[in-house]
Image (cartoon, rainbow, N blue to C red):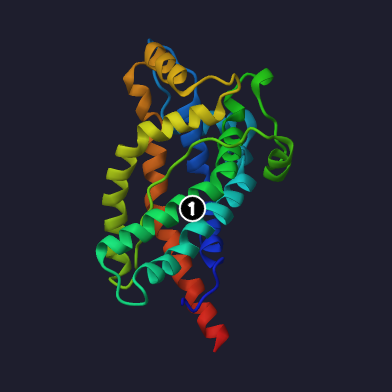
Amino acid sequence: MPEYPFWLGGVAASMAASCTHPLDVTKVRMQTLAGSGGSKRPSTLTVIRTSIHRSGVQSLYAGLTAALMRQMSYSLVRLGSYERLKEYISKGKKPTTPQSLLAASLAGGLGGIAGNPADVLLVRMTSDSVRPPEKRYNYPNAVAGLIGRTDILAVSGHPDEHVQLKDGLLLHVVASTLAGTFATTVCSPADVLRSRVMASTEGTTFTHILAKSIREEGVSFLFKGWTPAFVRLAPNTVLLFVFYEQLKSGWKNLAQ
């Protein structure tokens, strides 16, 4: 069994999310911005500049409580259960690649189920500023949103990855960047649609949102928010595992 507590991964993920949250806010706002066929999509810098101009720098940290709630549910379960599932599946022996993939898939699925309510809150809280006032949720914080709403169970999914630092931080950064480019591009359509379904205030279906978005904005809407998503992914991954390894090392030293 691992020599560190189950919840340590959630703490590391929360620390990383606190550093990269402004990029996550920008990504969701770009994904949920209403557009029309002839309008030019705003750039990442334009969205950041507009957010600061309208609501101040603190607007880039809107939904931080939901982000932390998500990491302490999704990432806590995902990272905390992975090693234990891998050990159980391999029956204490060195796991094979298929066994590791199975453990990662199960851990990611469990994390997705655990973190989905907070994920819905995160999308709604970070996209409120780009909505008309009458369609805003106005959650003061994630706990109030969770208690006050009963419609936060929606479908979400995220790629799961297992990275180790033993090969060196430079290799880790390069590998994270290359993997991040591929993952961001492949997952962008699903991520955009997920954000719009979660942010919807009209109870519309997935097919209706997809058809309406393609009709009004064209197929390119599926890649809205790609830049901040990519810029966020590499540092978030690096910070997550740097914090995680340091916390595990510190915990071991404390336990000795």
| Residue at horizontal 38 percent and vertical 11 percent from the top | 215
Quarter residue 176 falls in: bottom left
Mark 1 element type: helix
Along the line of sight, which residue is nearer the eye, 109 or 239? 109
| Residue at horizontal 32 percent and vertical 63 percent from the top | 100
Is residue 210 shown left or right of residue 247? left
The percent coordinates of residue 45 (x first, y second) are 44, 33
Under mark 1, the amino acid is Leu
| Residue at horizontal 36 percent and vertical 35 percent from the top | 188
Along the line of sight, which residue is nearer the eye, 196 or 229? 196
Q: Name the residue under label 1.
A: 110
Along the line of sight, which residue is nearer the eye, 37 or 3? 3
The percent coordinates of residue 134 (x first, y second) are 68, 18
**Res. 47 in view:** no
The percent coordinates of residue 198 (x first, y second) are 54, 31
Is residue 183 shown left or right of residue 73? left
Quarter in which the C terminus is drawn: bottom right
**Res. 224 in view:** yes
| Residue at horizontal 44 percent and vertical 50 percent from the top | 109
Residue 14 to residue 183: above or below = below
Which residue is situated farthest in the bottom direction here? 256
Residue 245 to residue 109: above or below = below
Quarter residue 141 falls in: top right
The percent coordinates of residue 44 (x first, y second) are 43, 33
